[in-house]
Image (tube, helix red, strand yellow):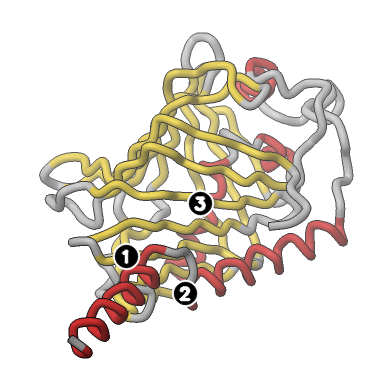
Amino acid sequence: MYWLILGIIMLAIIVTYFAIPGGRLWKQYLSDVKTSLAVTNIQGSTQRIFTEDSVARLPALLRQHIVNGGYMGKPIMDNMLITFHNTKFRMSAGKKPINIKFMQVNFAARPDRHAFLMGRIAGIPLQAKDSILDGYGSMTGVLAKQFQLFCSTGAEMDQGQLVTALADAVYMPSLFLQEYVSWATIDDRTVEGEIAWKGVSGKGRFTFDEEGHIIRFDTNDRYMDENGKGTSLVPWYVTYCNYKAQNGFVQPGEVSVNWVLADGDDTYFVSDRIEIQYSITDF
């Protein structure tokens, strides 16, 4: 009987440990976000409202996206906390997608971005941190909150995470206004942006529909990480659709993230319920 009771107690402890949030990767994520918040709080915004003057230097297509989104006359956001609900994620091509919880905090004063993924594989908690902090990118995965699956850093991560921050600006157009981003109009439906920070840069093209909404972002400057086993430049794109009124703005209600592989596109992230908070001061 003693051993049975002890076994039940140990099982309860294990289940509780797996069920509640936390772990060393989560603590590191919180620390990274708070570091970026501290910088933002010190620097503050140089312009507080989206006006005709503040967006005047942007290409006409980007200005229309801001107008369509209902941002004009509203505060220029310092950052955003974006939570993707009802999200499917695939670890690699050919794998079965899993349900995940995914959140990220993006910043405008400098292109910091901190994303955190929580899911389960065979019932065991999976956590991943996808981040760029003052130009240094990283991607870390942990199983059961303890066992590191991969940890990728280096120049490839720096560039890839920077380009991802550019793609995320669809939801945070204050990044369009930053001096570290430059623009070129390609044609009447396409604008190319280049983002540069601390000697690292990357380019991506935004495609617009006939109403002036951004519907796609493409780049050749993002490296595919093979779960810590190596990297290679692979075409990468994001699609945005189902624009609708949400969070007080008109924004894409669905997003998918994709690699262009030799044997077909790999759609590895899909979400159709997105929640955003702007200019948070604590986390």
Residue 147 to residue 222: above or below: below
Please state if 270 lies on the left or on the right of 226 as rendered: right
The answer to whether marks 2 and 1 mark residues whose Cβ atoms lie closer than 8 Å is yes
Residue 195 to residue 200: above or below: above
Amino acid carrying label 1: it is: Pro
Name the disc covering residue 23, or none: 2
Q: Return the residue at label 3.
A: 163
- Would you identify the image quadrant in which residue 233 lies? bottom left
Residue drawn 84% across the image and 24% down it? 51
Q: Residues within 10 Å of mark 1 (few under 14, many from 20)?
A: some
Which residue is situated farthest in the top direction here?
A: 210
Name the disc covering residue 125, or none: 1
For this rendering, which residue is in front, 151 or 124?
124
Q: CA distance from mark 3 to mark 2?
A: 28 Å
Please state if 279 lies on the left or on the right of 198 as rendered: right
Instruction: Tell me the SS state at disc 2.
Output: loop
Residue 101 to residue 208: above or below: below
For this rendering, which residue is in front, 90 or 205?
90
Q: Position of residue 242 (x, y in %)?
A: 44, 18
- Would you identify the image quadrant in which residue 237 lies? top left
Q: Position of residue 27 (x, y in %)?
A: 56, 73
Please state if 155 lies on the left or on the right of 199 as rendered: left
Instruction: Tell me the SS state at disc 1.
Output: strand
